[in-house]
Amino acid sequence: MPDGVQDATGSPAEWARHSPYSDPGRHAAVLAALGTDPADVQAAATGLIAHYRAEADTLDADRLPTVDLRWLDAILTAGFALSPAPLAGRPATARLAGCCRDHTLLGVGLLREHGIPARSRIGFARYFTPGFAHDHVVVERWDGRRWVRADPELDAAFGAAPPAGEPFDPFDLPTGLDAPFATAAELWLAHRRDGLDLGAYGVARELPELCGPDFVRGNVLLELAHRRRDELLLWDVWGAELHEAPEDVAVLADEVADLLVRADAGDAGAETELGRRYDADPRLHPGRRVRTLSPLGRDGWTDLTTRVTSWDV
């Protein structure tokens, strides 16, 4: 089946194939030579990519634009242009700017290169800052029995004494609404059905415009895109978020979130319906172009076919 075409069966094998985003291209042999344990994924991901905000002091101005790279082969090419060193344990000067989405994309690409079903999950992490949940992306792999979530930014020592919350295993994250990491869909449904206050969910407290219900709502649609193997940037906008009234987007997010939560609970029909809706509804699928609102303060349009972003002047 060609890249980008979904079978929407919900079989784990669906996520063993590369997407256009996770395909390492000429660097496939590099990933094939790496281990696939969560600790191996974490070492490779954090060795290549420095978080553009949390590790800003390790990045110079020339490397900051790499935060907008979206294709794994381009990320790896940029990394090896800096240094031919192995991915794990690189010096600070050989690391690219990126974020949790990029750490996860590398992890997903590594696992898929080994034939292991893997996908990225969009949600909010409660373990970085007391009283606040940051938007976050983690790896989910099929272990032969169940989907197992792991945070590719964290090692076991972090989980033993997190800055916020109780200790947890970052290589086998608990699941559910009250877990250290909850999905965007779970949180949105709890807000809409039960009145959960989403004021402390977002990018950061100091960025209130990127917090709250509207922000979580957008992440529900992003969660669907990633589940359907369109691993878009966290700051890409398309479809309903660009063209629909907020109240209409909220109703659409209700429907999508319900299907996502049901599919996570093992409802094969919900998984199939997610695939059908995503492929058929232009409000959900990015199509050829997305609006890219970079955290570097530049905005543009990205052609997902030519892989070119035209930045506004």
Image (tube, rainbow, N blue to C red):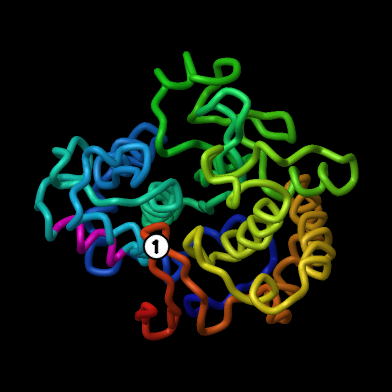
Tell me the quarter of the picture where residue 196 sits.
top right
- In the displayed structure, does residue 122 sit left or right of residue 80? right
Q: Residue furthest left?
A: 84
- Marks counted in the figure total 1
Tell me if 153 is positioned left or right of 78 in this view.
right
| Residue pointed to by mark 1 | 297
Answer above or below: position of 258 versus 246: above
Residue 269 in sight in this render: no
Mark 1 surroundings within 10 Å by alpha-carbon count, few (fewer than 14), some (14 through 19), many (20 or more): few
Identify the residue shown where x is 77% and y is 61%.
Answer: 253
The image quadrant where one finds the C terminus is bottom left
**Residue 73 in the image: x percent, y percent?**
29, 65
Residue 134 found in image quarter:
top right
Is 77 in the magenta?
yes
* Prevailing SS of the magenta stretch: helix
Look at the picture and state if 111 lies above or below 228. above
Quick check: 250 left or right of 219?
right
Residue at the spot 78% in from the left edge and 38% down from the top edge: 197
Whether residue 311 appears in this view of the structure is: yes
**In this rendering, would 200 be left or right of 18?**
right
- Kindly identify the amino acid type of the residue bearing the numbered disc 1: Gly
Write the start and end of the magenta stretch as one range: 73-80
Towards the viewer: 170 or 191: 191
Residue 250 rendering spot, x and y as whole percentages:
80, 62
Residue 181 part of the magenta-drawn span: no
Q: Secondary structure at mark 1?
A: loop
